[in-house]
Image (cartoon, helix red, strand yellow):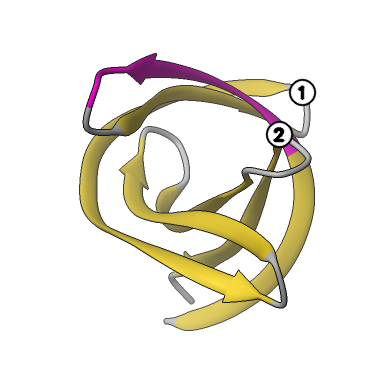
Amino acid sequence: MHYEKLEEAIEVIVHFSPQRIKPLRFLWRGRAHRVETVRSRWTTLEGRRRCYHYAVIAEGVGSCELALDIDEMVWQISSVVIDS
């Protein structure tokens, strides 16, 4: 098993509630993937730029990290864990 850094742009369907954003599905490399579990979430600041990160288990992908640049409103898949 190894970790692969990607940082590829994706499209994400989310649920917004007053306290949080929850990713539900995402489109990556032409395929739709359902988020089965959000394992953890955290926020980072790079200068004045805020990013929300989500460690998820996704159907057809497994463990991966999704990130939302809140200033640009751009999602990316940051990394995946590959079984080898």
Confirm or deny contact between disc 1 and disc 2 (CB under 8 A).
Answer: no
Question: Seen in the image, is 64 located left or right of residue 26?
Answer: left
Judge by depth and name the residue closer to the eye, 57 or 78: 78
| Badge 1 amino acid | Gly
Q: Nearer the viewer, residue 49 or 2?
A: 49
How packed is label 1: few (under 14 Cα within 10 Å), some, or many (20 or more)? few
Disc 1 secondary structure class = loop
Residue labelled with disc 2: 73
Q: Position of residue 11 (x, y in %)?
A: 68, 25
Q: Nearer the viewer, residue 16 or 57?
A: 16
Quick check: 64 left or right of 79? left
For the point 66% across and 22% down, the residue is 31
Q: Position of residue 82 (x, y in %)?
A: 50, 69
Image quarter of residue 30: top right
Badge 1 or badge 2: first in the primary sequence = 1
Residue 81 is situated, as x and y percent measured from the top left of the image, at 46, 69
Give the extent of the magenta segment.
10-18
Q: Is residue 68 magenta?
A: no
